[in-house]
Image (tube, grey):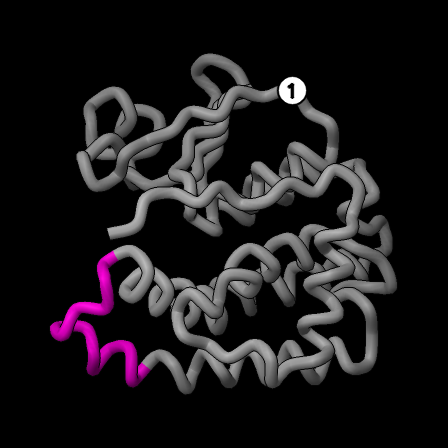
Amino acid sequence: MKLFGMSGSGNCYKPQLLMSQLGMDFEWVELDLRAGASRTADFLAMNPNGKVPLLEIEPGTTLPESNAILWYLAEGTPFLPEDRLERARVLQWMFFEQYSHEPNIATVRFWIAFLGNPESHQQKIAECRPRGYAALDVMEGELARRSYFAGDRYSIADIALYAYTHVAHEGGFELDRYPAINDWLQRVREQPGHVPMATGDRA
């Protein structure tokens, strides 16, 4: 398999982390999005949406969207529960990550860490940061009651939320106010096969 992505992207890190934890042999294909690498005719033929990550399962068969890739790869493994309700819980938190978490935490991180905190984005940052903290508050409440997000074991729900939470400080979010989240971050780091996110380029 080939995984097309950009170093430093949490969405690209998600499938990379799972594939490493599954012990899968895959090729990482680095794309420079700022140079338009995801807008070429060849790439758009694989993903008309022009975004990464993109998993090439075999020549001619590709799958975009980070959480869809996680679900596909986790099927039939301990990273995705068999119980109907627990599987729905996994989806619950993956939807939460994409709707409430990523749009506010990941985007603020991008504006600050990658674009250099431009003046033109200050109003957007001010609008997103409270919503980012609200998402962290929800996570803290859940993790105060349980060790992981779906059931009692580590799953792709944790991978989905870990990707941008563990670098939220790069967007100015104060994680030291969240003891349960910090304990969970450490548990994720201690999972077998864990690999760190590649740094990527900063502005």
- Residue 195 falls inside the magenta stretch: no
Count of number-bearing discs: 1
Vertical order, 6 against 180 (above or below): above
Which residue ends up furthest to the left in the rendered image? 120
Residue at x-position 56% and y-position 76%: 175
Q: In this rendered view, identify the residue nearer to me: 203 or 40.
A: 203
x, y percentage for residue 16?
A: 57, 37
Q: Main secondary structure of the magenta part?
A: helix
Horizontal side of residue 177 vs 146, given as left or right: left
Q: 10 Å neighbourhood of mark 1: few (<14), some, or many (≥20)?
A: few
Q: Which picture quadrant has residue 88?
A: bottom right
Vertical order, 170 against 154 (above or below): below
x, y percentage for residue 139?
A: 64, 77
Q: In this rendered view, identify the residue nearer to me: 121 or 60.
A: 121
x, y percentage for residue 57?
A: 54, 22
Amino acid of disc 1 = Asp
Residue at x-position 23% and y-position 59%: 115
- Residue 117 falls inside the magenta stretch: yes
Residue at x-position 64% and y-position 81%: 178
Horizontal side of residue 31 vs 176, given as left or right: left
Horizontal side of residue 172 vs 197, given as left or right: left
Name the residue beneath numbered marker 1: 25
Please provide the residue range marked out in magenta.
Answer: 115-127
Vertical order, 47 against 148 (above or below): above
Where the N terminus falls, by quadrant? top right
Residue at x-position 65% and y-position 33%: 19
Q: Which picture quadrant has residue 106?
A: bottom left
Vertical order, 49 against 136 (above or below): above
Does dot 1 land on a helix, a strand or a loop? Answer: loop
